[in-house]
Image: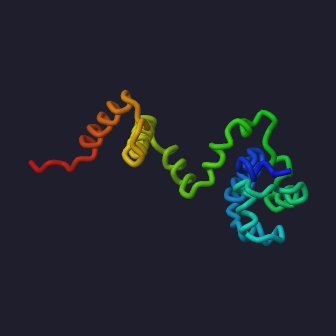
């Protein structure tokens, strides 16, 4: 019988476990290499666990938790965790640069967050064409462009 990961990508629960390992590892400033050494595996295996492409066995889950200084339950999704309904979102969290992008976005004031979303939609629309930006959003894009022209323009010499 084929593994679900072979047919539909990583299982959302495996992705959630990997994400928790990654989040804890990074919060404790532990490299993938250092965690791998502590567990007797390579950093490449840690990468596969963190992406959810390889399942973490029960024994490796317990060893990982110990190495990270938490109980094994801390690496498992909660009963009410939305993970099974949102595997695509979890998979996106492994994209290069996503953490920095989210951190930057979180530091922005709400009005600037909206501008970033509109700008990102416009960029997707410009690259891929089609209906990525709806008609009402096109007007917002124009307002954003006007805002940027007014906000970031060089001061005029008097």
Q: Nearer the viewer, residue 112 or 52?
A: 52
Left or right, 137 with respect to 36, comes to left
Residue 126 found in image quarter: top left
Above or below, 105 against 26 in this view is: above
Residue beneath the point at 70% across and 35% down: 85
Left or right, 32 with respect to 79, comes to left
**Image spot of residue 151 (x, y percent):** 27, 42
**Image spot of residue 19 (x, y percent):** 71, 51
Residue beneath the point at 74% across and 63% down: 46
Residue beneath the point at 63% across and 54% down: 94
Q: Nearer the viewer, residue 85 or 33?
A: 85
Residue beneath the point at 66% across and 46% down: 90
Left or right, 135 with respect to 62, comes to left
Most extreme residue toward the front, as rendered? 1
**Image spot of residue 156 (x, y percent):** 14, 48
**Image spot of residue 51 (x, y percent):** 70, 55
Most extreme residue toward the left, as rendered? 158
Most extreme residue toward the right, as rendered? 59
Most extreme residue toward the top, as rendered? 136
Left or right, 139 with respect to 66, comes to left
Above or below, 1 against 41 in this view is: above
Which color scheme does this rendered protein use? rainbow
Q: How many marks?
A: 0
């Amino acid at each position: 019988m084929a593994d679900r990961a072979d047919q539909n990508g990583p299982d959302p629960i495996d992705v959630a476990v990997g994400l928790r390992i990654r989040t804890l590892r990074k919060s404790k400033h532990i490299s993938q290499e250092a965690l791998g050494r502590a567990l007797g595996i390579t950093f490449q295996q840690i990468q596969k666990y963190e992406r959810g492409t390889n399942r973490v066995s029960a024994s490796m889950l317990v060893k990982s938790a110990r190495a990270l200084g938490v109980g094994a339950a801390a690496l498992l999704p909660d009963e009410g965790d939305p993970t099974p309904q949102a595997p695509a979102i979890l998979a996106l969290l492994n994209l290069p640069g996503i953490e920095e992008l989210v951190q930057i976005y979180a530091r922005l004031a709400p009005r600037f967050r909206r501008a970033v979303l509109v700008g990102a939609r416009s960029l997707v629309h410009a690259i891929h064409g089609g209906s990525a930006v709806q008609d009402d959003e096109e007007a917002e894009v124009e307002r954003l462009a006007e805002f940027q022209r007014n906000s970031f323009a060089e001061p005029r010499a008097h």
